[in-house]
Amino acid sequence: MDHFEYHDGVLHAEGVALPDIARRFGTPCYVYSAATIRRHYRVFTEALAGIDHDICFAVKANGNIGVLGLLADMGSGFDIVSVGELERVITAGGDPARVVFSGVGKRVDEIERALEVGIACFNVESEAELDRINAIAVHRGRRAPISLRVNPDVDAQTHPYIATGLKDNKFGVAIERAEALYARAAEMDGIAIRGVDCHIGSQLTGLAPFRDAVSRVLVLIDRLAERGIEIEHMDVGGGLGIRYRDETPPSPAEYAQAIRELVAGRDLRLVLEPGRVLVANAGVLMTRVELLKPGADAGDKHFAIVDAAMNDLLRPALYDAWQAIVPVREARVDGSETRAWEVVGPVCETGDFLGHDRELALAEGDLLAVRSAGAYGFVMASTYNARPRGAEVMVDDNQAHEIRARETIADLMRGEQRLPPG
């Protein structure tokens, strides 16, 4: 469920009509619903009732400070993959002691900053990284809390670019190597073992791969206990999918029940890293039709050229991802013909599209909303073709708040300069 609905034929975010937001903030523009984020967080936490757990929102899904602040106020922790994301969490009011730090390439300065602010755990992804964290912690007279991210070699049955749990992927330590590496870590002066981490991919639409991966991790935890290495928490990652089109992902309740069955009888705290499932359907990308370019002959494609492009929303071009595209005004009064439109942007790439073969009745100037854009939307946006990124707006009940101002051309050129004369 989300809070984007038609009222009198006009799409609203909660109590605010999207055309009003377009008039105030322009297009393209990301619009988020605070009520939807709150509801999704509550549903997720309520599903986990009775399980000792900590929810750490995956900041890579949506790093806007307004979004992070909303989640922090509801009690969320955070999963980060860079020092930039860490600083965003701190600025938004998040507690560093509720932060887990993932990612395969943590720099020395990032590790130092994370130690300085006292994060909960480093999710270590290689032996080299373990050695680096240990050396930094020893130099600073600290012990770094860590878990090893183990790669269980499980096929998440998702898009290859967002699968992370196979041997061919760059992520984590092979599960057959993990026990020996934990034994090494236990002897390190700068390391405090806290948990085991596993994340097999994003947009998971079935529980079987998740069950398989967690079962393998639990076997590892038992073997570690036999060696006297106690594990306080198991981080099961995130990746629970949403419905973009015809997917049937598990509900949070089904996901939580699978966890209950897997960890029954164990004294083990669970760490979860949901991202997409909390925010994707809480956002839309609003765009305006600039030009229509219908095909001249039968069989020709009809192009609707909009003011949003692949630099604003990369998922369709990168993954061939499908997201619903709907008119902001539901009914037409000008007799425009419904056609199968290629919804494309003005970027000079053939791959610049938002949707193929979308049945729409369009006229120049119409507003469209790309649904399910609250995750991996703005965070993946760029300024390719010298296109400033659009505004981000959060609607809370009947108020629209600009939580990121639209960039200007001057913003894009800040810090650049010509070579000196001569």
Image (cartoon, rainbow, N blue to C red):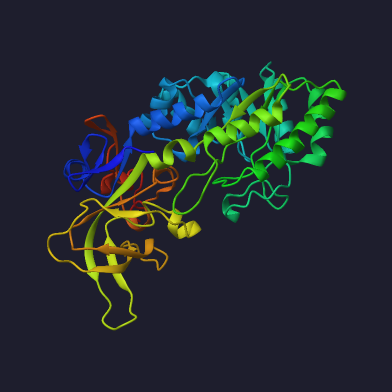
Closer to us: 283 or 412: 283
Q: Residue furthest bottom?
A: 297
Q: How many marks?
A: 0
Find residue 407 and report its image quarter. Answer: top left
- For the point 62% across and 52% down, the residue is 157
Q: Nearer the viewer, residue 88 or 52?
A: 52
Q: Residue at x 57, y 31 (%)?
A: 110
- Residue 14: x, y in percent? 27, 35
Which quarter of the figure is the N terminus placed in?
A: top left
Regarding residue 169, the answer to whether it shows in the image is yes
Picture coordinates of residue 103, whole percent (x, y): 61, 38
Q: Residue furthest right?
A: 227
Nearer to me, 296 or 80: 296
Q: Position of residue 314 (x, y in %)?
A: 43, 54
Residue at (42, 29) in percent of width and height: 68
Q: Which residue reaches farthest top?
A: 141
